Image (cartoon, helix red, strand yellow):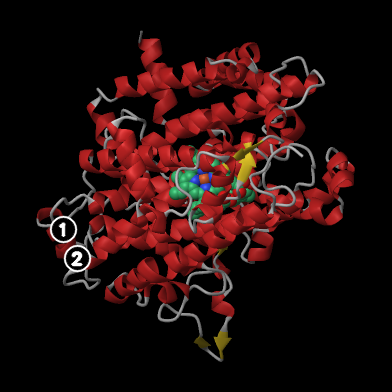
Amino acid sequence: MSRLKQLQQGAVNSQIWKSVFRVGIPNTNRKRVLAVLGSLILHLHPVKVRRSGVRMSYTWCMGGTSFFLFLVETVTGLLLMFYYRPTIEYAFTDIMDLREQAPFGIMREMHRWGAHAMVIAVWLHMFRVFMTGSYKPPREFNWNVGVILLVLTLLLSFTGYLLPWDQLAIWAITVGSNMARASPGAGTEGPMSGLIKLGDIRLIHAGDDARFALLGAKTVGPSTLLRFYVLHCVAIPLGAGFLMAIHFWRVRKDGGISGPL
Amino acid sequence: MTFIKDFVDVLSGSSISFLLLTSLFSFLIFFNLLDGRLRSKGGSVFIGFGLLFLISGIFIRPLLYLAIAYLVLMFLLANLGPRVWETRTGLIILVAGGGAFGLSMLDPQFYLIAAKPDNVPIVAMIFLLGFFTWVALRKAYLNDRQLLAGGIPWEKTESDEKLFTCPDLVYTEMLCMIVLTIVMIVWSMALRAPLEEAANPTSSPNPAKAPWYFLGLQEMLVYFDPWLAGVLLPTLIIVGLMAIPYIDTNPRGNGYYSFRERKWELGIFLYGFLVLWSFLIITGTFLRGPNWNFFGPYEYWDPNKLVPLVNIDLSELIWVKALGVALPKIWLIREMFGILFCLAYLGLPPLLAVGPFRRFYQKMGPPRYYVGTFLFLIMMALPIKMVLRWLFNLKYIVHIQEIFFNV
Ligand code: HEM
Ligand code: HEM
């Protein structure tokens, strides 16, 4: 037995190792089963999976990639939260500082490119699911959960876009949120909104319409920043995380990854 | 030589290129529906369009170029047909596209737009979309061939066999995560995240663009009012996506790649996803400059570019131009034609149910059929409006400023 093997054996047989990994090297079928069942993370998966489903050419790994990128975003986002204050006095300068002062300052890059990549990965995942017809019974509901996840992914990206508080940010959000002004019945400039009246007084105006609810003001300003910050860092990630749990659970309950019947 | 330059200029310099590009994708997709056969009923429609273009090209120069591009493309497709997907031809086309892109980067104007940090992922997306479309259709066509010969799709040969999650799946996932981590780190070190000047609510940049994934919606704003492009249509896109599993009752093609067994579903989805969704985003990102004017890929983004405003309402077209009378005062009469047109359009489903769509009506049953065709018509309203705008400068079909209701 070589030195290396001995060292490995010693490590694997130590009390520390055994306390963490109950089964040791999964080199028998029994251990392979136990390794998955005994681990919180691995037991997201069933013990056995279809050979066709494991192929990269079938799933393109895009679901897993979306999830992984979500985790990357969570970790880098958390680190960014240490530096960033969501007020118009500080937001922009904090981002500047992050670039100039923070050691190993690629967290912002990673978070931004990760967000772009996640949007693309989710689209490609949806594309794959469509192309394999995996939304068909019994997976109709999981497709719907997926669509909501897609919307949440876009909203996460949208709310995050404002946070650097530079020209790119506020004008993109201004353009994006201008559309809310035109919601039928709920925006000042939407069709039918003018008909909602109490006597002569219009009930839907710039101070209470759909856009106002989104921005917290008549234009993109301090309250918008705070609103988007809370949505971006707390509300939407929690919602998305919750839906992902359902999504993964349903993949299992619907019979694992799809395959021909 | 001047002919070639003229050719490229015309094709990339005006709305004609829109027509070409959207139709290019549509041809690819709908040609697939015909298995690339020209000598079929559908094929003759394609040929008819080509001849129509050619004849009108005699009078209108840009249409001549369009006709040439169209016909060349069609015969190329008809001859290559499924081979684009079944062999590596598709991949070669993609690599050639990459090469053309690389060469284009030598052009300073092209480089300026394509190398903008926020645009880099979208460049990557174009190639990823191309690549995965090829992967999916290749697998679908290969499966179809098996199925035609009475065989089974390849997934079936493996789907009853079960592997242990640990190690097979876990190792693949680990590899995938390692590769992604490396990609993310390298990408983040190589490309700085953009940061412009501090926000200034009093000076708006030109063009002011929404985040890139919403640029398809912003592009729709060119053709529709905000309440449609920004509110109603996005809502219907989401509703439509969610409705897909309930409308599509075709039991075949579940859990494997196939084209023949799901022609119409795939045709419609690919058109929506690749053309109406992705292509519009790409246009909005790379081809829309100051004042949201259209710019060819090598064109300088001139903020002073003048585009004549010649758009005209349907009501004016009919009352003033065709009938030679003044616009009626009462909007119901003024917009009569447009309203009738819209009602007729939305009233199509029952007519189609006894006509060409009878097969679908019988297979799907009334509720599925009506919801499905309604969503389909809404989807097709966008390209219809686009073509009406490019060819006839049509502004609104119905224009009721009195209640902010314009279509
Ligand atoms: C190399 C690419 C990948 C392949 C081929 C792959 C394959 C699969 C397969 C076959 C399933 C379904 C298992 C089942 O039948 O229930 C699955 C689900 C899942 N994958 Fe991946 N995956 C990849 C990457 C990833 C990555 C990087 C992650 C996480 C960071 C991940 C996380 C998940 C999760 C959470 C589920 C849902 C739970 C489950 O159903 O098992 N995957 N993946
Ligand atoms: C943040 C977004 C999402 C994450 C993290 C995610 C994650 C996953 C994972 C890990 C799987 C396992 C198989 C695979 O990797 O392909 C999966 C399957 C699935 N996803 Fe998603 N997904 C997301 C969004 C979506 C979207 C947008 C849709 C559709 C509109 C969708 C529909 C489905 C369906 C139907 C399955 C089952 C596929 C099968 O069994 O073959 N998901 N998802």
Place of residue A37 in the rendered image (x, y in percent of width and height, measured from the top left): 56, 54
Q: Say above or below: A206 vs A16.
A: below
Say which element carries label 2.
helix
Where does the C terminus of chain B fall, quadrant-wise? bottom right
Label 1 belongs to which residue?
A: A98
* Res. B224 in view: no
Q: Amino acid at mark 1?
A: Leu
Quarter-of-image position of residue B288: top left
Where does the N terminus of chain B fall, quadrant-wise? top left
Depth check, front residue: A44 or A199: A44
If you read the primary sequence from the N terminus, does the residue marked by circle 2 or circle 1 appear first?
2
Depth check, front residue: B262 or A244: A244
Is disc 2 surrounded by few (<14), some (14 to 19) or many (20+) residues within 10 Å?
A: few
- Which chain is disc 2 placed on? A
Q: Say above or below: A224 vs B377.
A: below
Left or right of A241, for residue B162: right
Place of residue A114 in the rendered image (x, y in percent of width and height, measured from the top left): 35, 49
Label 2 belongs to which residue?
A: A83
Depth check, front residue: B266 or B178: B178
Measuring 46% from the left and 56% from the top, which residue is drawn there? Answer: A153
Q: Amino acid at mark 2?
A: Tyr
Place of residue A126 in the rendered image (x, y in percent of width and height, measured from the top left): 56, 45
State yes or no: discs 2 and 1 in contact (Cβ < 8 Å). Answer: yes
Disc 2/disc 1 C-alpha distance (Å): 7 Å
Answer yes or no: disc 2 within 8 Å of ligand 2.
no
